[in-house]
């Protein structure tokens, strides 16, 4: 008699899981790579805001450049958040499929247990005759 784990492995739609795994993995890798690039290209915070006596206020051009850099960083973060949201949605969809497969397995296990119980009762009845 096969173990329940073997039955579970047979019920899970491995084709779908395998089909979507590379997409999820690629999205996760892109997200990690983008975050590494942003950390590497971002200047240190202390260099952006000089302080101390005799420091000249930044010019309008410098402020515009800082604003542009901040806007680009925000846009990059928004893109990363959108990709992360899509990745989480893909994982949730796969999780829902796995839950459905486990529910089918649970129902089949109950039916098998009931059939085994009926078979055992019938066998005992035949043996006692």
Image (cartoon, rainbow, N blue to C red):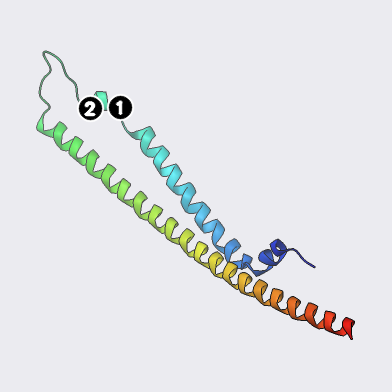
Q: Residue at x 38, y 56 (%)?
A: 85
Residue 24 as seen in the image, left or right of residue 74: right
- Is disc 1 placed on a helix, strand or loop? loop
Residue at image position (61%, 68%) is: 13
Give SS at disc 2: helix
Most extreme residue toward the front is: 128
Q: Which mark is residue 44?
A: 1
Are the two marked residues, 2 and 1, in contact with CB atoms closer than 8 angstroms? yes
Q: Is residue 66 left or right of residue 93?
A: left
* Mark number displayed over residue 48: 2
Spatial CA span between label 2 and label 1:
7 Å
Against 89, residue 72 (above or below) is above
Residue 10 image-quadrant placement? bottom right
Residue 43 lies in quadrant: top left
Task: Name the spot of residue 8 as percent of width and height, x first.
Answer: 66, 65
Q: Give the quadrant of the N terminus.
A: bottom right
């Amino acid at each position: 008699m096969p173990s329940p784990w073997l039955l579970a492995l047979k019920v899970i739609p491995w084709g779908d899981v395998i089909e979507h795994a590379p997409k999820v993995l690629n999205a996760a890798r892109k997200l990690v790579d983008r975050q590494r690039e942003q950390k590497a290209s971002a200047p240190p915070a202390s260099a952006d805001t000089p302080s101390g006596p005799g420091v000249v206020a930044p010019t309008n051009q410098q402020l515009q450049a800082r604003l542009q850099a901040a806007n680009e960083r925000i846009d990059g973060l928004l893109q990363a958040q959108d990709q992360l949201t899509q990745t989480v949605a893909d994982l949730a969809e796969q999780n829902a499929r796995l839950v459905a497969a486990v529910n089918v397995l649970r129902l089949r296990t109950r039916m098998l247990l009931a059939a085994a119980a009926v078979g055992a009762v019938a066998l005992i009845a035949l043996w006692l005759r």
